[in-house]
Amino acid sequence: MTLVAGVDSSTQSCKVVIRDADTGALVRSGRASHPEGTEVDPAAWWDALQEAVADAGGLDDVAAISIGAQQHGMVVLDVDGEVIRPALLWNDTRSAPAALDLLREVGAAEYAARTGVVPVASFTATKLRWLQDAEPANAARVAAVALPHDWLTWRLRGFGPAATSVVADGPAAENPLGPVLTQLTTDRSDASGTAYWSPSTGDYDLDLFELALGHAAVLPRVLDAADQAGVTARLVDSSNHAWLPAGIVVAAGAGDNAGAALGLGASAGDVIVSIGTSGTVFAVTDQPTTDASGSVAGFASASADFLPLVATLNAARVLDSIAALLGVDYDELGRLALEAEPGAGGLVLQPYFAGERTPNLPEATASVFGMTLASTTRPNLARAAIEGMLCGLADGLDAVQALGVAVGRILLIGGAAQNPAVRAIAAQVFAAPVVVPAPGEYVADGGAVQAAWALTGTRPTWAAAIAAEPAPDFQTVIRAQYAAHAAASFL
C-alpha cells in the first residue's frame, strides 16, 4: 500500500492525514495547536508540523506530502533566509488603510482586471504596503516574500537559514541546503490571494508588487497542481531524532479554501458553502472571474480551474448569539427552529453582528424586523436566526452567480452543517440541491489528493462520503422577506 500525507496548517492548528494513495482510505492522523493571535512567528508552525507528524505516527512509510495552509499570510525573509518579523495573518486588519491607499493609486476596476481581486486587508499586497509605511527598516531588508504554505514547503525540502548544528550520522539538524531563496515555490490558488498575481495570465504583476513593498524581491515559483516542488531532506529535531526522511515527494501545496475544494472532489458546477465562525461561498468554474466591486474574489483553484469566492463575517456566530439569548444549546435551537413555519411568521433577523464584508457594511449592526405579538416566539426567533444566517450566505451566492457562474449543487460544510435544522432550512433557502458531506479535515484531505496527484501524475478520484442530502424544498418567502427588509434598512 502506497501512502500519502496531507497537511492543513490553519490559523488554529496543524492537522496531518495519511491516506492510501489508491483508495483514499484514512490510515492515521495527527494534530497540534498553533498560538493565538493575528501575527505569529512562523517557527511556531514548523514546531506544530513536527508535533502533528509525530502524533500521526511519522512519515517513514509515506511516499508524498502536500501542505495546505491559511491564505494571504505575509512571511518576509532577508538575504540569509531569516524571518524578518512575525507573519501577519489573513485576519490581521491593521493593513486596511493600506488597502485603501492601493485602491486610490490603482483603481478598483484596474486592480480587478490585473489580478482578479480588489485589495482588502486580508490580502498579502496590503500587508506589504503596511510594512513599507509602518516598518520601513524591516521593509528595506525584505529579499523574498512567501505565504505560509510556501515557507513550510521550502523548509520540508531542506532550505532555510544556515543551520548551526551538525549531527554525526547525517546532515545538518535543520536546513541542510541553506537559504536558497530562488527555491521558494507556491501554487496557483495561494498566489491568487496575494493581489499581485493574475489567475488569467498566470503571471506575477511585478509593478503592483513593487508598488506594495517599495522594491523588487524574490517571489516563489508558481507550480501547477500536478507539479512536484521537489523532495524532502533528512531532518532531525532538537533531540537528534530524524523526524523527516529524505526523498519524500513534495507537491505544490494550496491555500485552504482551494485545498478544501480539492479534498471534497468539487468540480465545475459545485458551490461550497462553509459555515464556520465566519462564512465562505466559493465555486469551482472553468473560467476566471472579475468583480470590480470587490464582493467576489477571483481566485484560482488548486487544480486547473478557478475559485471565485465570497466571504461573510457572520455565520455560526449568529447561532451562538441567539442560542445564548434563548438559553439553549445548538441541538435545542434546531428543534425550536423546526417548530416554526418557513419565514418564521414574518420575523426576519439581519445578522450583521460583526458588521459585514459582503455586502461591504463594516459599521452595520444586527437587526430584527417584523416583531409582533404573534410572531415574537422562541421558535420563530430560532428559525429567524438560521434563516438570516443562510440568507446572508445566499446573498454571497447571488454575487457569484451574477458573474455568470453556473450552480449545479451546493456542498454545505462546517460545524453548523451537521445540525438537522440548518440542513433542512438550507434546502428551503437555496434553490439548488444541497448535499452535506461527512465531517472531515477537508483541507488536509485536499493535500493528500494533491500529494497522490504529484506522485502518480493522475488526479485521484476518491469517493467523498455524504452525510445527508435534504430534499429540495425551496421556499420563496424566506429570501423575499429578507431582501425586502434589507432594502428598506439601507434606504
Image (tube, rainbow, N blue to C red):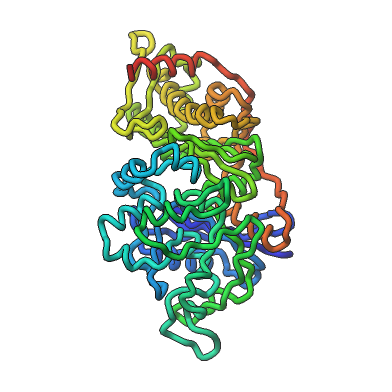
Tell me if 7 is positioned left or right of 211 in this view.
right
Residue sticking out furthest to the bottom:
168
Residue sitting at x 38%, y 43%:
106
Residue 115 appears at what percent x and percent y? 49, 45
- What is the quadrant of residue 344 in the picture? top left
Position above or below: 223 against 426: below
Residue sitting at x 46%, y 42%:
117
Residue 270 appears at what percent x and percent y? 63, 36
Picture mark count: 0
Residue 29 can be seen, yes or no:
no
Residue sitting at x 62%, y 30%:
407
Residue 325 can be seen, yes or no:
yes
Q: In the rendered image, which quarter contains the N terminus?
A: bottom right
Position above or below: 464 against 142: above
Residue 391 appears at what percent x and percent y? 47, 25
- What is the quadrant of residue 389 in the picture? top left
Q: Nearer the viewer, residue 384 or 406?
A: 406
Position above or below: 365 against 54: above
Q: Nearer the viewer, residue 396 or 113?
A: 113
Residue sitting at x 48%, y 36%:
296
Tell me if 4 is positioned left or right of 47 in this view.
right
Residue 234 appears at what percent x and percent y? 56, 78
Q: In the rendered image, which quarter contains the C terminus?
A: top left
Position above or below: 239 against 355: below
